[in-house]
Amino acid sequence: MDVLERAQTPTPKFFKELRSIGLIVAAVGDAIVQVPVVPPVAVVTIGGYLTVIDGVLSAISQITVDDKDKPECSKGAPDE
């Protein structure tokens, strides 16, 4: 199964919720980075890290699929 097929198949419920949490984390991180006043460097750094965490979390959650509906391979044949 290639990445495009994975991205188009249904995502399990747990990972849908994880993706939603990631979007909230991204909003918080973006709000911290975009604040109009000059915050301390540590706060801006944390905002940047939150944004990166969201990107990774959302990407992994999107390509996670449920293998229950996938037919089993017979006699140990490799997946294609």
Image: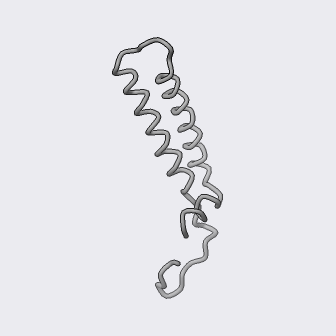
* Camera-side residue of 4 and 21: 4
Residue 43, quarter of picture: top left
* Camera-side residue of 33 and 6: 33
Residue, far left: 42
Residue, far bottom: 75
Q: Is residue 51 above or below residue 70?
A: above
Image spot of residue 6 (x, y percent): 58, 62
Q: Residue at x 51, y 32 (%)?
A: 25
Q: Residue at x 37, y 27 (%)?
A: 45
Q: Residue at x 64, y 60 (%)?
A: 8
Residue, far top: 37
Q: Residue at x 57, y 66 (%)?
A: 67
Number of marks in the rendered image: 0
Is residue 77 shown left or right of residue 70?
A: left
Q: Is residue 9 above or below residue 35?
A: below
Q: Is residue 14 above or below residue 53?
A: below
Image quarter where the N terminus lies is: bottom right
Residue 40, quarter of picture: top left
Image spot of residue 74 (x, y percent): 53, 85
Residue 38, quarter of picture: top left
Image spot of residue 41 (x, y percent): 34, 20
- Identify the image's colour scheme: rainbow, by chain, secondary structure or one colour: one colour
* Camera-side residue of 45 and 64: 45
Image spot of residue 77 (x, y percent): 48, 85
